[in-house]
Amino acid sequence: MDIAEAPQKTGKIRAQNRKNILAAAEDSFVKNGFKGTSMQSIADAAGLPKANVLYYFKSKQALYLAVLDEIINRWDETIEDMSEGDDPAEVLRAYICAKVDLAIQYPSASKIFALEIIQGAPNLQEHLRTNLRTWVREKSKIIQSWIDQGKMKAIDPEHLIFMIWSTTQHYADFDAQILTVTNKLEYDDDDVQRIKELLCTVILGGCGLNV
Amino acid sequence: MDIAEAPQKTGKIRAQNRKNILAAAEDSFVKNGFKGTSMQSIADAAGLPKANVLYYFKSKQALYLAVLDEIINRWDETIEDMSEGDDPAEVLRAYICAKVDLAIQYPSASKIFALEIIQGAPNLQEHLRTNLRTWVREKSKIIQSWIDQGKMKAIDPEHLIFMIWSTTQHYADFDAQILTVTNKLEYDDDDVQRIKELLCTVILGGCGLNV
DNA sequence: GTCTATACAAGGATAGAC
DNA sequence: GTCTATCCTTGTATAGAC
């Protein structure tokens, strides 16, 4: 059946090439940084001539922005709703677990985002100032309402969010350090489970929530 | 009196030049990455001709390693001792506060270290496998003894250490994100104080320690 | 010890053939 | 739409004058 497929389905080839290029670019941007990544190496990894990469993305900068955009969008999809009536323990636990899963499943995405922010977020200022700031304020308002209702300890909501981000993303961004120090080759399912439980225990416990 | 100083104190000029180069390199490595940093820009920032930089450090790689080395040594100096007889709340609080101070005072150092680890720690494998692993195991043993003595909740000691690292260094590494989202230009003394209190409240509280 | 000039390589981007 | 050949810039490193 594969053979029977019409080869002139150009849209499919195009989409596949785009996908290959983005994946190769993501890998190389993590390991070598923006400047350290050559279009040639991306082309090689994607199995295309160099000029074709520049045909799909008009410049290295444009390709990098496309990679960033893909990451942001993927993260946005995982935002779950919370409301004032919810149980904070339940919502925070779900959010922490979701963030750990994302970090373990897409470590390169987390790393590229981290590299961009650490270097001063030259390409994400707008996103931080608009989308992300709005998101944080909305969620903070709800957390604050939980505090006002006496459902949890008075922990600054914005910094509680930063804390969840830092602890969860750390397992992706700093995997080289964590794995080397703990003498492991990679995380296994048990590790992931233990990490989730530990983060929930400490963070929820620290917020005065039953664990 | 400045004028009276003998200008032929070559050792002094040498040390000053070295220091200027290292500071300029640190700045540029953070903003532009290793490959994105040119020796020319470092030379300009240090007020020297390009060739002089290569006279002090035989290659860009050697200069980068010198920067890394400086960072590691600076951090090692701040390691304080803890023992089985100590009060966990006191020791952990002091460690968290010291790490926050370091992050706020030397953000570039934290960022370069983070960049190196995120990119796979190609130049720090040895350090992680030997020095750092040993350090973590020693401290973990003591934390475990506190747990065995019933002084605190049973939180995996190694991951507790990772958690302290991630939450404290986050304020240096992700300052661009945190400041933009919270709409501030820089951290002030009150912010630092609040960050310390918040981290201690959540982490110590999560470990079942009185706060 | 310090600086100028330059060799040499790598890489981004484009022009133009197919 | 795809690929080859090439231009041009940038950057590391060195050789050698001062």
Image: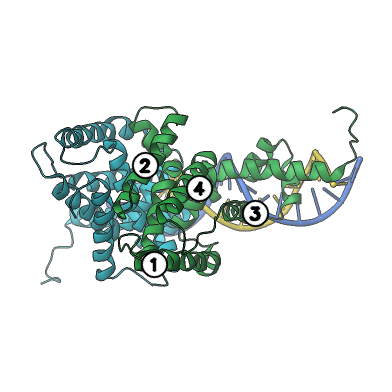
Chain colours: A green, B cyan, C blue, D yellow
**Picture quarter containing residue A196?**
top left
Horizontal relation, residue B197 to residue A135: left or right: left
Horizontal relation, residue A155 to residue A72: left or right: left
Residue B143 in the image: state x and y as whole percent. Answer: 19, 37
Residue type at tag 4: Ser
Q: Quadrant of the N terminus of chain B?
A: bottom left
Q: Are marks 3 and 2 on the same chain?
A: no
Secondary structure at numbered mark 3:
helix
Residue that numbered label 4 is attached to: A110
Marks 1/3: CA–CA distance: 36 Å
The earlier-in-sequence mark between 4 and 1 is 4
Chain of the residue where label 4 is placed in the rendered structure: A
Chain of the residue where label 2 is placed in the rendered structure: B
Residue type at tag 2: Ala
Residue that numbered label 2 is attached to: B62
Marks 3/2: CA–CA distance: 34 Å
Q: Residue furthest left?
A: B85
Q: Would residue A39 be seen by someone viewing this image from the given angle?
A: yes
The earlier-in-sequence mark between 1 and 3 is 3
Residue B115 in the image: state x and y as whole percent. Answer: 42, 47
Numbered disc in front, either 2 or 1: 1
Circles 4 and 2 in contact, beta carbons < 8 Å: no
Circles 1 and 3 in contact, beta carbons < 8 Å: no
Residue type at tag 1: Gln
Residue that numbered label 3 is attached to: A66
Numbered disc in front, either 3 or 4: 4
Numbered disc in front, either 3 or 2: 3
Circles 3 and 2 in contact, beta carbons < 8 Å: no
Residue B148 higher or lower than A156, as above or below: above
Residue that numbered label 1 is attached to: A144
